[in-house]
Image (cartoon, rainbow, N blue to C red):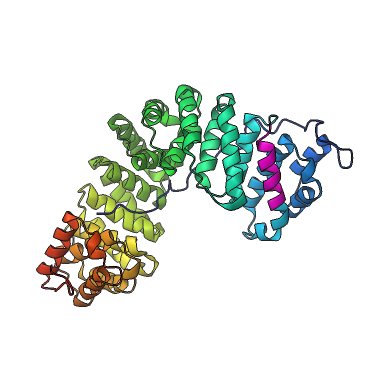
Amino acid sequence: MSSPAGMKGGRGGSGKGAGRGGKGHGGGKGHSGSGPSPQLLTANIKNAKTLAELFRTVAAYESHFNHIHLSACWNTLGHMARDDPNRSWFEQHEAALEALVQRTTIVAAGSEVRARELANIAHGVAKSGRGGGAGGGTMGELMTALARAIEGRVTDCNSQELANIAWGFAKVGHTDASLFSALARVAEKRLDGFKSQELANTAWAFATVGDADAALFTALARVVARRLDDFTVQGLVNTMWAFATAGHSDAPLFAALSKRAQWRLAELTAQDIAQAAFAFAKIGEADASLFSALARATEQQMTQFNAQGLANTVWAFAKVGHMDAPLFTSLSRAIENRLSEFNAQDLANTAWGFAKACHSEESLFKALARSAGSCLSDFNTQDLVNTAWAFAKLGQGDAALFTAVASSLVLPHRRLGELNAAQISNIAWAFAKENQVLVGTSY
């Protein structure tokens, strides 16, 4: 069985504003006299009304930018880019953006830049949407330079800066084990001083980069459980997702999260519902009262679910064994109308979920067979096995689909060689049950 993909913390939180960085007005260093004073340059950056105006200042004076100017510039850029409906702004200002990136990389390596400016820059880069993962060209080089500079000043960071740095690096997909290890050790000792959003964003960030630091998550669980009344609904759901994704099971925390989610059920969006179900299922917390409440909420908001949310909800309820027949019937109707939006893993997890729940819907499975047959090349090996198993389990044999699955396993990549013992057993059972021949094999 493959767990649903995505659900990356849902709405993913958002690092809070610009930390302590907004107070400086720019020092006198680096001012050659050929441009505006450092104080005026800072004001021009902060007072820019449009991206075009901001990048005109960058193009004219980036060589004069010090650490305070860069902090202000990235903070302003992050807010403007996030709110700008023109998503191709970076193409229009490519040269100035590249100059800003290179200047920031140089200054980040210097001795004057402080933790607060580094945090603001990392946060601004992430909010601009132009950050790059490791190896991602000059943006990747900038994030690496920021990581090394922050690592050397991490003990100077306050709680908001620690959370914003972790969030920023996770948001751009720049995984830096050394930096996150340093962040974890400092944050772990200061969590009592974190605000609720900072706690949620820190958990989300570490889970997103795949750093399930046991000591940090243990400390987070202790503090979060005491502070749940301060969390927004998004913070609650993102925290569930983070602990589940990190594989950090903490029964008292999940019991407390369950109670809060049920108390605030009316505030949950469709995405929140799907994400909460996913998190509890993934971590193996089959809280019956929570899933009963989520089932009711799902029925009420069914039309608001996206394709991934529908598939993951089926997967989650089946995974924990919460077999709610009316819910699965409603999900079947909703999914059948939206199958054109499903990707390969959504299709596989939907089929698996209905089979695991022993809930047969002939019309849905006919539609699933058509949709799966048209995109089997996108299925990974586990999804192929799960799909064949699901159709056989419910007696929904489809000769064309099984022939296509056989071809996908044998040709062109000869994926039969990738199967483990359990997969071989499941695929052999499925084909035998449906009296299908796995052509080209000895199975």
**Is 171 on the left-hand or right-hand side of 130?**
left
Percent coordinates x, y for residue 330 in the rendering: 28, 61
Above-or-below relation of 82 to 111: below
Seen in the image, is 17 located left or right of residue 425? right
| Image spot of residue 170 (x, y percent) | 49, 43
Q: How many marks?
A: 0
Q: Vertically, is 127 above or below 415?
A: above
Between 392 and 277, the one lying in front of the other is 392
| Vertical arrangement, residue 222 with respect to residue 246, above or below | above
In the image, what residue occupies the spot 31% across and 64% down? 347
> Is residue 104 found inside the magenta-colored segment of the image?
yes
Quadrant of the rendered image containing residue 368:
bottom left
Magenta stretch bounds: 98-110
Left or right: residue 111 versus residue 385 is right
Q: Is residue 288 left or right of residue 436?
A: right
Please name whichever residue, 162 or 298, is drawn nearer the observer in this view of the structure. 162
- The location of residue 88, given as percent across then percent down, is 64, 60
Question: Magenta stretch mostly in which secondary structure?
Answer: helix
Is 429 included in the stretch rendered in magenta? no
